[in-house]
Image (tube, rainbow, N blue to C red):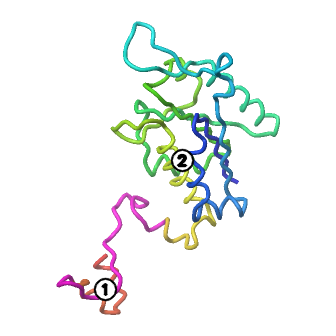
Amino acid sequence: MLRFEVLTLFPEIFSSFLEQSLIKRSIEKGLLNVNLVNFRKHGLGKHLQVDDSPYGGGPGMILRIEPVFLTLEEQKYFHQSQGRETHSILVSPQGHPFNQKKAKELSQHNSVLTLVCGRYEGFDDRIRSLVDEEISGGDFVCMGGEVISMAIIESISRLLPGFLGNQESSELESFSQSLLEYPQYTRPASYAGMDVPEELLSGNHEKIAQWR
């Protein structure tokens, strides 16, 4: 089983994602497990505060270190008591860009993959010292790490044996061979003056392979 754990202030964002298509089916088959943990439970005071204004001034609020630290420690201890190791990943714009090579590497981990989602204007920089690595979704900024975490989970999960109905799909598709996938077409063969290439209609498998 491939295990993910997501530390987030907004676990409800994942509800629809985990209830759809192959993700849901793989969870039901026991191939995949995604555990959502709201680190607000370790917030401060009666309002469970998780953010504060930055030292030195500046716009917005940043995540405090305590809630993230305590949640990571708690979950790490829990998994160790179950005989599992953890590999923690901070989802941040400063991280290494996520790609197919990293997806394949992480899919072969035996550890629980813990994704830490930031929010607001960022997080106390000391949080970086608490994780094993940082991953970025690209050179853009989202409101939080949840959307990027979904992309990471889906990309890694579909490399699992048995996740896809046809394992050849993951082997031949985009980037698996360091190439973009060839153009594909379906019926009708001609529409509004746009035609499917003759090679694909020939029935000649060698010619089709050469065209692709």
Position of the N terminus by quadrant: bottom right
**Residue lying at 48% horizontally and 45% vertically, measured from the top left:** 147
The quarter holding residue 47 reads top right
Q: Are marks 1 and 2 in contact (CB under 8 Å)?
A: no
The residue closer to the viewer here, 29 or 86, is 29
Lower sequence index among marks 1 and 2: 2
Q: Residue furthest right?
A: 81
x and y, in percent, of residue 192 in the image: 20, 84
36 to the left or right of 170: right
Q: Residue at x 39, y 9 (%)?
A: 57
Q: Main secondary structure of the magenta part?
A: loop
Give yes or no for residue 172 being in the magenta stretch. yes
Amino acid type, residue under disc 1 in the picture: Leu
**Picture quadrant of residue 66:** top right
Callout 2: 10 Å neighbours few (<14), some, many (20+)?
few
Quarter of the image with the C terminus is bottom left
Disc 2 element: helix
Q: Nearer the viewer, mark 1 or mark 2?
A: 1
Residue wearing tag 1:
200
Left or right: residue 147 versus residue 58 is right
Give residue 59's position: percent from left, percent from top. 37, 18
Segment tinted magenta in the rendering: 171-194
Magenta stretch encompasses residue 185: yes
Q: Amino acid at mark 2?
A: Glu
Q: Residue at x 55, y 50 (%)?
A: 153
Is 92 situated above or below 4?
above
Which residue position holds label 2? 105
